Image: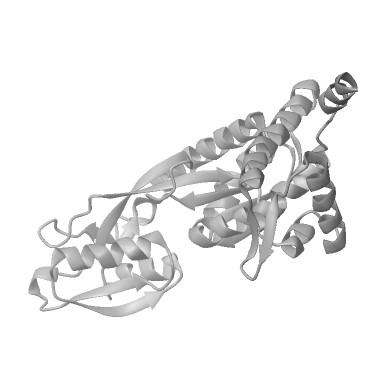
């Protein structure tokens, strides 16, 4: 009898479909959101989680007013589940000789939407012709939340110190910029245009002004980067602009004696744990190639 029990335990197999649902529940923290992400009913997801707990023989999650919290066993299974699903996808990719295909939900920072459509999508379409892209534009911090909730497969986001697992795509300087027609040294207060949104550039802009210990007043705010750049071009205000928006014909770098332009903005790629490495590598290569084309294209204009 003991030998039979041992043999039965060895024959137990985890169901990848159950693991896929479990990962989505863990990521979203709610059965309802997980159900919407995988196109199932909430009742079906609940039944799947019950079956999974019966299969592994332990409680994987606890429900409370704060949502679903994983138990220690749940946290352990989550790590293995992500590895199993990646290996499953990698196996199919290795055995399938066709080009990469399928629908991908891309998250793109709002201020890079036009560049993504003009430079990035043509490269992705050429290199991965069977890719069906759905693009969602939002702020980087919101895109991170959407990816965590299972709403996105891949997102381009601004790098931040708290996140160390991002994949670097490209970097660009952040430059304190002013119109060529403005003389800041003659002004008692420096007019400033500030990003009116929850983003890292807004944080860096305000932090830089405070550290500089200069007298300034906010005269313009917008959640759209191009509007802020226009305020700078017109001479209405100065601001912190990405190098890709620095037009040397219209604006100049603010003197380092007033504000130092020593910041770098890293644009990174983050992804769902469901996507296997070959696909990520291919898409990352395309995005890097497109970013190079974008910089060259703007330089030649």
- Residue at 74%, 58% (x, y): give it: 34
Q: Position of residue 61 (x, y in %)?
A: 69, 54
Instruction: Name the one closer to the observer, 87 or 3.
Output: 3
Q: In this view, does 111 lie above or below 78?
A: below
Q: In this view, does 20 lie above or below 85?
A: below
**The N terminus: image quadrant:** top right
Q: Is residue 239 above or below residue 7?
A: below
- Residue at 36%, 60% (x, y): give it: 201
On the question of residue 42 being in view, the answer is: yes
Q: In this view, does 254 lie above or below 270?
A: below
> Which image quarter: residue 217?
bottom left
> Which image quarter: residue 210?
bottom left
Q: Position of residue 166 (x, y in %)?
A: 48, 42
Q: Left or right of 34: which side holds 199?
A: left
Instruction: Name the one closer to the observer, 125 or 95.
Output: 95
> Which image quarter: residue 2?
top right
Instruction: Name the one closer to the observer, 140 or 257.
Output: 140
Q: Left or right of 92: which side holds 173?
A: left
Instruction: Name the one closer to the observer, 208 or 68.
Output: 68
Q: Position of residue 140 (x, y in %)?
A: 50, 58
Residue lying furthest front in this view?
1
Asked which colour scheme the image uses, the reply is one colour
Q: Left or right of 170: which side holds 48?
A: right
- Residue at 53%, 49% (x, y): give it: 156
On the question of residue 126 being in view, the answer is: no
Q: Position of residue 172 (x, y in %)?
A: 36, 46
């Amino acid at each position: 009898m003991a030998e039979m029990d041992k043999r039965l335990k060895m024959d137990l197999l985890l169901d990848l479909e159950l693991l896929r649902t479990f990962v989505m529940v863990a990521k979203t923290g709610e059965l309802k959101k997980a159900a919407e992400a995988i196109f199932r009913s909430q009742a079906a997801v609940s039944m799947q989680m019950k079956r999974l707990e019966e299969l592994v023989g332990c409680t994987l999650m606890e429900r409370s007013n704060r949502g679903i919290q994983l138990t220690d066993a749940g946290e352990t299974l989550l790590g293995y589940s992500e590895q199993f699903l990646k290996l499953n996808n990698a196996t199919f990719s290795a055995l399938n000789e066709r080009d990469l295909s399928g629908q991908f939900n891309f998250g793109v920072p709002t201020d890079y939407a036009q560049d993504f459509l003009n430079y990035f999508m043509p490269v992705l379409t050429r290199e991965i012709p069977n890719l069906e892209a759905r693009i969602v534009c939002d702020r980087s911090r919101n895109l991170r939340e959407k990816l965590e909730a299972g709403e996105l497969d891949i997102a381009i986001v601004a790098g931040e110190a708290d996140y160390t697992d991002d994949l670097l795509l490209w970097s660009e300087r952040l430059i304190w910029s002013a119109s060529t027609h403005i003389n800041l040294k003659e002004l008692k207060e420096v007019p400033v245009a500030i990003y009116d949104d929850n983003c890292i550039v807004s944080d860096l802009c305000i932090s830089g002004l405070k550290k500089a210990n200069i007298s300034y007043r906010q005269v313009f705010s917008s959640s759209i980067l191009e509007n802020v750049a226009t305020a700078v071009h017109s001479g209405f205000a100065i601001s912190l602009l990405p190098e890709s928006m620095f037009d040397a014909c219209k604006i100049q770098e603010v003197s380092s004696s007033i504000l130092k332009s020593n910041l770098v903005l890293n644009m990174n790629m983050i992804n769902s744990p469901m996507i296997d490495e070959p696909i990520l590598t291919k898409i990352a290569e395309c995005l890097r190639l497109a970013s190079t084309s974008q910089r060259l294209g703007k330089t030649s204009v």
